[in-house]
Amino acid sequence: MTSDEQTKTWVLEPETEYRFELDPDTTLAIKLIKGQAEVFGAELAEGVVYLFGLECKAAVYTWQGCTLEICRTHSAGRRPSTEYISDETPMAAYMNMHLALEQMRVRSLSLAQNSPIPIPKGSSGAPPGPPHVLVIGPENAGKTTACKIIANYAVRAGQDWAPMFVNVDPGEGGWTLPGTVSACPITTPIPTQTPANPLGSTATSAPTALASSALVPLVYWYGHAEVRQNPLLLDRLIRNLGENVTSRHDNDPLGKSSGIIVDTPSSFATGSTGPASEKKFALIQTCIDAFHINVIVVVGHEKLNVEMQRMFGSKLSVIKLPKSGGVVDLDISYRERVHRYQIHNYMYGTHISPPPGLVQQQGAPGSTTEESEFNTDSRLSPLSTTINFNDLTIYRIGGGAIAPSSALPIGAQRIVSELQPVPVDPAQKGSGLLNSVLALLAPLNPDDNERYDEEVLDLSVVAFFVVTAVDVRARKMTVLKPSPGSIAGRIALMGSFEWQDQ
């Protein structure tokens, strides 16, 4: 780090945290000078420079106390819009929950190895089996942060745990793009350096030596940011994820014992599709069934905790976690900017420019490993190619945004089902293909003798690309894709996301 006026040293007492919120076009450099510190459960190494950017909002917590060196981040010398130290954190509650989940993992693995651990008399007893945790709560409660802390603590336990992290929030983006639901086993701590990669990144054409490119999530395309646009489709995709996760765990005793952590959108807890409570929480019930949930974690909502206790308390363990005072209320414009960051990073990779002074030290003669190990430069080179209209079969599920059944006139019926794949003709005026984000699906299974109309809903995503130009006269379109390879004869799905390369 530099030692001029741009650098400030922060001394944190035990069980306190340094919180920061970045403005657009600013980056923050943090180096742990001494002590122990972590970012959402991921431990920081002493002497290593960590860069944060793209309007990142995070916190550095310490259990034992530490000294941090913070470098201001903008060419104009601006500091983060918000930065302060807080001694009011919910980390003790998170640690207690981690210890309870760890007991469940140990007992599950011991049982799988035919050496069950006896339960002490008088113990309240944890739910049987490995921890299958569903995290729910209102908007801006810190649900994703809670999931990351739980997962990171499990990975750091030193037992080779690989918990399955499941993201069913289509507005979050997970490992790839917004509009998806996905699942991935976590074997290394999840970093938090930009909101463009909230759960780490899966590099599409970067060297495989990068830790991030070792992540290979299973991804399904929902195509929208809001759950209400097609809840039936989301229900089906969640069940598809559940079947695949269960199938994987059948042949992986250690992974099965590591458990499942499911992150959900706020609409699961607050949305309603009908007056009855069982319909109100229909997608929560879907997650419980699909992932065999035995622990529900409610973050920051007393009434929701009471409702979950009433509905599921007799069958599942319901835990209430406090909301952190550092949680930031995110507005719609911020979320839209993050979606653009995610799509851009998927195509072009991650690059956070270090503050002035660090640039000269990176790779300079005599520079140390700590000074040059930024781990935030994995730039990619997408390809622009022209294809014929006939090379690709494109569908839109349900024919676009779907109004709820209650919004239809009395006695009226839908012409297009919410789950019906509707072909998109690129030559048709108003197709909406220009600048549209398309999901390239896995090939159809050649072993299936019979085809069914909704088969494309059950195909996972292998890549994403963007239509950058449409030439109707020549019946050709130009697409930007992250890696080489022909897409002729393949199937792609269209959603409501658009992106322009700027």
Image (spheres, rainbow, N blue to C red):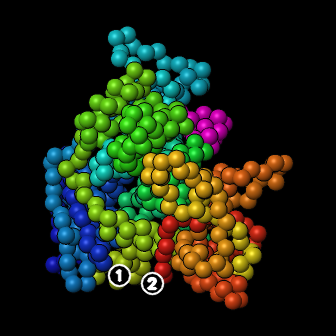
Quarter of the rendering occupied by the C terminus:
bottom left
Say if 56 sits above or below 384 in the image. above
Circle 1 residue: 359
Mark 2 crowd level (few <14, some 14–19, many ≥20, 10 Å Cα): few
Q: Position of residue 460 (x, y in %)?
A: 64, 55
- The residue depicted at 58 percent of the width and 66 percent of the height is 494
Mark 1 vs mark 2, foreground winner is: 2
Q: What is the quadrant of residue 281 in the picture?
A: top left
Instruction: Name the residue at the bottom extreme.
Output: 473
The label on residue 50 is: none
Q: Position of residue 490 (x, y in %)?
A: 73, 67
- Disc 2 marks a residue whose amino acid type is Gln
Query: Magenta segment, principal secondary structure?
Result: helix
Mark 1 crowd level (few <14, some 14–19, many ≥20, 10 Å Cα): some
Circle 2 residue: 502
Q: Position of residue 195 (x, y in %)?
A: 38, 64
Q: What is the quadrant of residue 338 in the picture?
A: bottom left
Of callouts 1 and 2, the N-terminal one: 1
**Region rendered in magenta:** 242-258
Q: Is residue 149 left or right of residue 440?
A: left
Say if 269 sits above or below 428 in the image. above
In this rendering, the count of numbered labels is 2
- The residue depicted at 54 percent of the width and 63 percent of the height is 400
- Disc 1 marks a residue whose amino acid type is Val
Q: Is residue 276 left or right of residue 74?
A: right
Determine if residue 78 is in view.
yes
Say if 354 sits above or below 132 in the image. below
Check residue 253 for magenta coloring.
Answer: yes
Quarter of the rendering occupied by the N terminus:
bottom left
- The residue depicted at 30 percent of the width and 33 percent of the height is 305
